[in-house]
Amino acid sequence: MHIRQWLMDISLGNDLRLYWCLFRLREKTDSRLSADILTFLLNRMAHKRGGYIGRGAKIAAVPSLPHGLHGIYISRYAAIGSGCRIYQNVTIGEVGGKAPQIGNDCLIGASAVLIGDIRIGNNVRIGAGAAVSRDVPDNCTVVGQPVRVIARVDQDTCQQAPYCGV
C-alpha cells in the first residue's frame, strides 16, 4: 500500500488496525485501570468516526467494515462471529440487557437494525434497511420491515431453495 493511500485511509477512519489492537488488548487485560483507559481511548476513536462498540461486546474475529466505523453501533451485550461484513449505519442494539448473537460469515447491509434477544444464524445475508427482531436460521437472506426470508441456500447441494418462512 502506498503511503498516500494509507494516510487517506487513516484520515477517513477506514484504517482501524490500531483500534482492533487496542480492542484485543482491552479483552486481555486484568487491570481495571488499564481497561478503563483503553475503553476511553477506544470510545474516542470510535466517536471520531461516528460509531460505538460496547465494552462487553464479544467479537470473534475482526469484522470487515468496508466503510469503517461510520455510524455503526454495537451493543455491549452483542456477540459477533468470525468473517462478518458490516456496512455503514448498522445498529446491533439491546433490549433489557439482551442483544443479538450473530453467527459466522454474515453480511449486514447498510442501515440495518438488529435488536433484542435474537440469534442470527451462520451465512445469513441481511438486506439494507432491514429491521430484524426475530431469529433468522442459517443460510438465509432476509429483507424488509418486518423482515421476511426471501431465499435459503441448501449447503449440501449449493442450490437455492424456494421461499422458506421463518
Image (cartoon, helix red, strand yellow):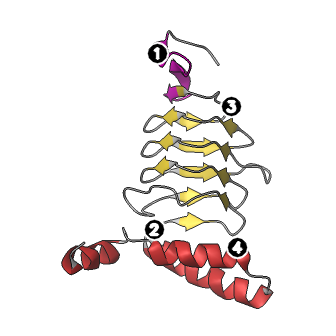
Q: CA distance from mark 1 to mark 3?
A: 20 Å
Residue corresponding to mark 2: 50
Left or right of 159 on screen, residue 26? right
Categorize mark 2 by other alpha carbons within 10 Å: few (<14), some (14-19), many (20+): some
Residue corresponding to mark 3: 135
Say whether disc 3 or disc 2 marks the residue closer to the N-terminus: 2
Say whether disc 1 or disc 2 marks the residue closer to the N-terminus: 2
Tag in front: 1 or 2: 1
Q: Nearer the viewer, residue 108 or 133?
A: 108
Numbered circle sitting on residue 141:
none
Q: Quadrant of residue 43?
A: bottom right
Say whether disc 1 or disc 4 marks the residue closer to the N-terminus: 4
Q: Confirm whether the magenta stretch covers residue 151.
A: yes
Q: CA distance from mark 1 to mark 2?
A: 37 Å
Q: Position of residue 76 (x, y in %)?
A: 70, 62
Q: Which residues are magenta?
A: 141-161
Q: Secondary structure at mark 2?
A: loop
Say whether disc 1 or disc 3 marks the residue closer to the N-terminus: 3
Residue corresponding to mark 1: 160
Amino acid bearing label 1: Gln
Secondary structure mostly seen in magenta is: strand
